[in-house]
Image (cartoon, rainbow, N blue to C red):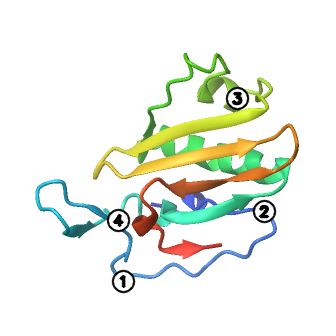
């Protein structure tokens, strides 16, 4: 995964890339209580990023889309229940709803990610792995 694929607010500095194996882990569905390492393809996305400002949300949408386009993750959101715009529509410039919620899945290891925010009152949200044990860093 390239440096551009890291989800980060615009004001945050870029962390240094490491050649070490990621400490991000997801449950191994075959063995109760055991964990396996996430794949190298999605390990840079195993961070919890607060989204405080509209620019943070725009940047997270941009980076998620880059990772969808390059095949790292796929959009698995089901917006039919909420009736909001799809992820691709929001990326294309359609206004987001008061509640933003999109889900993604690593195409290699199956790690699940969430991009969610409450935009009406400005409470913000997060980009994060759905499994809390997968978070390798809070930024």
**How much space separates mark 4 and mark 2, taking CA atoms?**
24 Å
Quarter where residue 48 is shown:
bottom right
Give the residue at x 33% y 44%: 107
Badge 2: residue crowd in 10 Å (few <14, some 14–19, many ≥20): few
Query: For mark 4, does the 10 Å Cα neighbourhood hold few (<14), some (14 to 19), or many (20 or more) residues?
Result: some
The numbered mark at residue 40 is 4
Q: In the drawing, what numbered circle is on residue 10?
A: 2
69 vs 11, nearest the viewer: 11
For disc 1, the marked residue is 20
- Relative to 104, is 83 on the left or the right? right
Residue neighbourhood size for the residue with mark 3, other residues' Cα within 10 Å, grouped as few (<14), some (14–19), many (≥20): some
Residue named by callout 3: 90
Which numbered disc, 3 or 1, marks the residue that appears first in the sequence?
A: 1
- Above or below for 69 versus 60: above
User: Where 13 sits versus 68, above or below?
Assistant: below
Marks 2 and 1, the one that precedes in the sequence: 2
Residue 8 horizontal side relative to residue 35, left or right: right
């Amino acid at each position: 995964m390239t440096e551009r694929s890291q989800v980060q607010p615009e004001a945050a500095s870029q962390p240094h890339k490491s050649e070490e194996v990621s400490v991000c882990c997801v449950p191994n569905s075959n063995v109760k209580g055991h964990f396996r390492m996430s794949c190298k393809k999605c390990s840079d996305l195993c961070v919890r990023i607060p989204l405080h400002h509209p620019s943070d949300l725009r940047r997270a949408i941009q980076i998620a889309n880059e990772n969808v386009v390059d095949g790292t993750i796929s959009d698995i959101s089901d917006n039919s229940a909420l009736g909001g715009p799809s992820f691709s529509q929001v990326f294309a410039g359609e206004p987001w709803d008061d509640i933003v919620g999109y889900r993604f899945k690593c195409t290699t290891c199956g790690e699940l990610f969430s991009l969610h925010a409450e935009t009406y009152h400005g409470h913000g949200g997060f980009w994060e792995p759905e499994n809390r044990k997968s978070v390798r860093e809070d930024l």
